[in-house]
Image: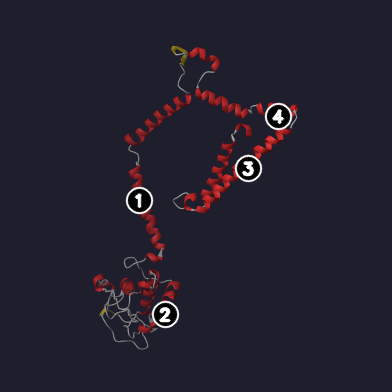
């Protein structure tokens, strides 16, 4: 088998097979693995050098063994190498048929009368492979015309619009599970035990100093009554915690130190104080807020630039 496939072709076949396997198993993003990862490039270079070395060693061994044979053994070896396997013969016959050319001994049948300084011209027919390809291209062109110009099939612009629509749906589905993408417009009240427990831990670590552990208020306002300075409800409370309280006398903007998902958890926990009775409730501040009254306008919420220990959200 080795005598029918050149050494360079064997090396290339094995090398590209290994390269394809590496590309399949190595996560390289949009770029090929050997461009994205220098270690992959080094590995492929070493593989290529190894294959070349192996091919050279095998050729040297084969030649050494051949030279060690006596004359009779060499004759038998040469005769066996001269034999053409059946599948090789089939390939050669198929190749000749696709070419459509006549053997040299039959060329006299298609020689034209032209003679240019002893150069004679043959009247060969078009190669069958070329002719079949031409017929296939005609059939493809007819099918393409009917599909897209007669029956108005989806073109690349329609496919692009479909992909855009699918991508938009995928993004919306992703947003449902990506908690840190939450903002003022998408935040919702969290009721899960894990979310509220984490919200309580964050509240105890950051808010108790100003609002007390039961939300009764101290430096900051009371979180248990219906009065809100910057608006109640999950959206307004989330916005106030994220962007900070009133300029100059409110709390800092916690978006610098808390993730959006954590702010949503704290805001949800803060709202659990509604309707409870703190031990020492602070006097009510702000206006009574109800869901029917709507949320506060965004321009009513100002971000403080003063770094203070106050954590007022009410």
For mark 2, give the secondary structure. Answer: helix
- The alpha-carbon separation of the residues under discs 3 and 4 comes to 23 Å
For mark 4, give the secondary structure. Answer: helix
Say if 272 sits above or below 73 in the image: below
Q: Which residue has dot 3 on it? A: 54
* Residue 77 - label: 4
> How crowded is the residue under tag 2: few (<14 C-alpha within 10 Å), some, or many (20+)?
few
Taking the spot 37% from the left edge, 58% from the top edge, the residue there is 172
Q: Which residue has dot 2 on it? A: 205
Which mark is in front, 1 or 3?
Answer: 3
Q: Which residue has dot 1 on it? A: 164
Taking the spot 53% from the left edge, 46% from the top edge, the residue there is 19
Q: Position of residue 83 (x, y in %)?
A: 66, 26
- Of residue 101 and residue 2, the one placed in the foreground of this image is 2
- Of residue 40 and residue 190, the one placed in the foreground of this image is 40
Q: Is residue 77 visible?
A: yes
For mark 1, give the secondary structure. Answer: helix
* Residue 202 position by quadrant: bottom left
């Amino acid at each position: 088998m080795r005598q029918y496939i050149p050494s360079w072709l064997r090396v290339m076949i094995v090398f590209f097979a290994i390269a394809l396997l590496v590309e399949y198993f190595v996560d390289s993003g949009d770029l090929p693995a050997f461009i994205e990862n220098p270690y992959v490039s080094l590995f492929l270079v070493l593989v290529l050098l190894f294959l070349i070395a192996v091919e050279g060693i095998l050729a040297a061994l084969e030649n050494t063994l051949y030279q060690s044979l006596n004359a009779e053994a060499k004759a038998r070896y040469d005769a066996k190498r001269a034999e053409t396997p059946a599948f090789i013969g089939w390939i050669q016959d198929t190749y000749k048929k696709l070419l459509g050319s006549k053997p040299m001994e039959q060329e006299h049948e298609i020689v034209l009368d032209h003679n240019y300084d002893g150069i004679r011209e043959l009247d060969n027919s078009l190669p069958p492979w070329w002719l079949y390809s031409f017929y296939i291209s005609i059939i493809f062109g007819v099918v393409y015309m009917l599909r897209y110009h007669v029956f108005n099939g989806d073109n690349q612009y329609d496919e692009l619009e479909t992909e855009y629509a699918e991508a938009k749906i995928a993004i919306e589905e992703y947003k449902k599970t990506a908690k840190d993408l939450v903002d003022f417009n998408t935040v919702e009240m969290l009721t899960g035990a894990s979310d509220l427990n984490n919200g309580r831990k964050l509240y105890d670590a950051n808010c108790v100093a100003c609002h007390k552990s039961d939300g009764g208020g101290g430096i900051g306002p009371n979180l248990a009554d219906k009065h809100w300075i910057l608006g109640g409800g999950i959206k307004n409370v989330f916005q106030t915690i994220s962007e900070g309280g009133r300029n100059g006398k409110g709390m800092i903007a916690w978006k610098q130190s808390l993730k959006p998902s954590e702010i949503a958890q704290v805001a949800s926990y803060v709202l659990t104080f509604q309707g409870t009775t703190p031990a020492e409730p602070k006097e009510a501040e702000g206006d009574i807020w109800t869901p029917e009254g709507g949320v506060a306008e965004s321009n009513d919420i100002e971000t403080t630039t003063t770094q203070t220990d106050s954590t007022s959200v009410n």
